[in-house]
């Protein structure tokens, strides 16, 4: 797209094409210890597994021989064995490494190969990307995984695009209505928000205001810093008395109107108001309040058109996310035509 094209609202198909260039989480490492997992990314079924050397791998979840699901198979060395006829496929490049029915493995067809995808590890998750990535993995300069105490909550899926849930995470106007049980009687009026956007990143500082009875969830939290990296990461850094807590949320596009979500809760060494297990449990209660509402949102795709919905001053941060999302899509499409596919 030209610079003028950046003001054009991308279609659903263009968003999906752009997201093929976005690193997205496909599994937690801890879950792969029990064997391969199936993950769908933008309509493409993937088999995610740990090789015997402990390295994660991502390949197409379809055997090129007779089409069986490879995520139902077993790991054999650095390869994944098909459950149907035992053909083995290398996690590194998708090449066929063994066909049990052949007495001479030199007879493996030279073109026997399935798609294999780039793999990265971060925050206890396996990430992959379907095409040449536009950026590196998202990173949070304040979250040092080596210094913080942190752990995963239970992943979940939603019948909406991931942008709808990412936006909910940053929508402060819904607290008074959705989170009364966990946050108490929150004020309905939202103070003037002043988000700052730098390319794909949006940040916002605000003082934390909770209602009576919210201490169990929020403790001594008095200030929060929201940090969003479009299109699929959002986080909150919570400043307590002399320490910090955080919640990091990342998402995968199963398709235009389906998504998978992973989240990490953590705190710094000097935080002593609750255990990690209690922190994760508290965050899970907040998610449980959101999910029924978000699951019923229409339309099921995040609207990127500024005039398609009503907005107020309380929506300034979520609108900044939509702008960052649109910029990601525009830049991904501008250079995508030059990438081999």
Image: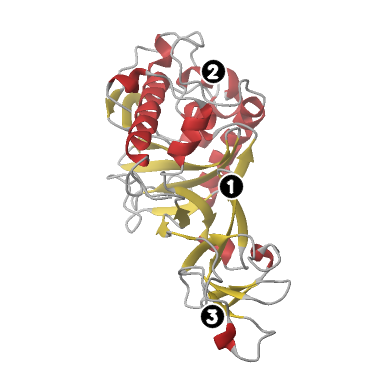
Which mark is nearer the camera, 1 or 3? 3
User: Cα distance, mark 1 to mark 3?
Assistant: 28 Å
Q: Which mark is residue 211?
A: none
The quadrant the N terminus occupies is top left
Residue 42 image point, x, y percent: 55, 43
Q: Residue at x 51, y 11 (%)?
A: 309
Point out the residue furthest to the right here. Answer: 84
Where's residue 101, x and y in %? Answer: 70, 84
Q: In the image, what residue occupies the spot 57% across and 64% down? A: 32
Whether residue 238 sits left or right of residue 42 in the image: it is left
Q: Earlier in the sequence, mark 1 or mark 2?
A: 1
Q: Is residue 165 left or right of residue 242?
A: right
Residue at mark 1: 155
Q: Which mark is residue 176?
A: 2
Dot 1, how many residues are within 10 Å of its Cα: few (below 14), some (14-19), or many (20+)?
some
Q: Position of residue 341 (x, y in %)?
A: 43, 50
Front residue (pair 73, 176): 73
Residue 118 horizontal/vertical position (percent) = 42, 59
Is tag 2's residue or tag 3's residue first in the polypeptide sequence?
3
Residue under label 3, please give it. 77
Relative height, residue 37 to residue 154 (above, below): below
Q: CA distance from mark 2 to mark 3?
A: 53 Å
């Amino acid at each position: 797209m030209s610079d003028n094209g950046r003001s054009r609202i991308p279609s659903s198909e263009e968003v999906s094409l752009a997201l093929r260039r976005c690193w997205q989480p496909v599994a937690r490492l801890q879950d792969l210890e029990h064997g391969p997992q199936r993950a769908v990314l933008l309509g493409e079924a993937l088999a995610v597994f740990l090789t015997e050397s402990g390295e994660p791998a991502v390949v197409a979840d379809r055997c090129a021989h007779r089409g069986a699901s490879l995520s139902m198979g077993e790991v054999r060395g650095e390869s994944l064995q098909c459950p149907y006829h035992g053909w083995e496929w290398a996690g590194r490049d998708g090449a066929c490494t063994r066909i049990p029915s052949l007495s001479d493995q030199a007879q493996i067809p030279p073109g026997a190969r399935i798609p294999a995808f780039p793999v990265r590890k971060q925050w206890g998750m396996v990430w992959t990307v379907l095409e040449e990535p536009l950026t590196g993995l998202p990173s949070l300069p304040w979250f040092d995984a080596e210094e913080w105490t942190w752990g995963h909550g239970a992943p979940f899926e939603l019948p909406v695009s991931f942008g709808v849930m990412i936006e909910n995470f940053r929508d402060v106007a819904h607290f008074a209505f959705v989170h009364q049980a966990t946050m108490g009687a929150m004020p309905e009026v939202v103070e003037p928000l002043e988000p700052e956007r730098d390319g794909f990143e949006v940040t916002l500082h605000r003082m934390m205001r909770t209602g009576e009875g919210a201490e169990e969830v929020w403790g001594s939290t008095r200030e929060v810093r929201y940090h969003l990296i479009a299109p699929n990461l959002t986080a909150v850094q919570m400043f307590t008395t002399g320490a910090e807590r955080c919640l990091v949320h990342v998402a995968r596009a199963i398709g235009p109107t389906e998504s998978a979500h992973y989240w990490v809760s953590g705190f710094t060494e000097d935080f002593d108001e609750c255990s990690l297990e209690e922190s994760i449990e508290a965050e899970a209660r907040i998610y449980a309040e959101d999910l029924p509402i978000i699951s019923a949102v229409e339309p099921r795709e995040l609207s990127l058109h500024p005039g398609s919905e009503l907005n107020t001053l309380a929506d300034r941060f979520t609108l900044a996310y939509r702008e960052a999302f649109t910029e990601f899509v525009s830049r991904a499409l501008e250079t995508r035509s030059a990438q081999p596919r």
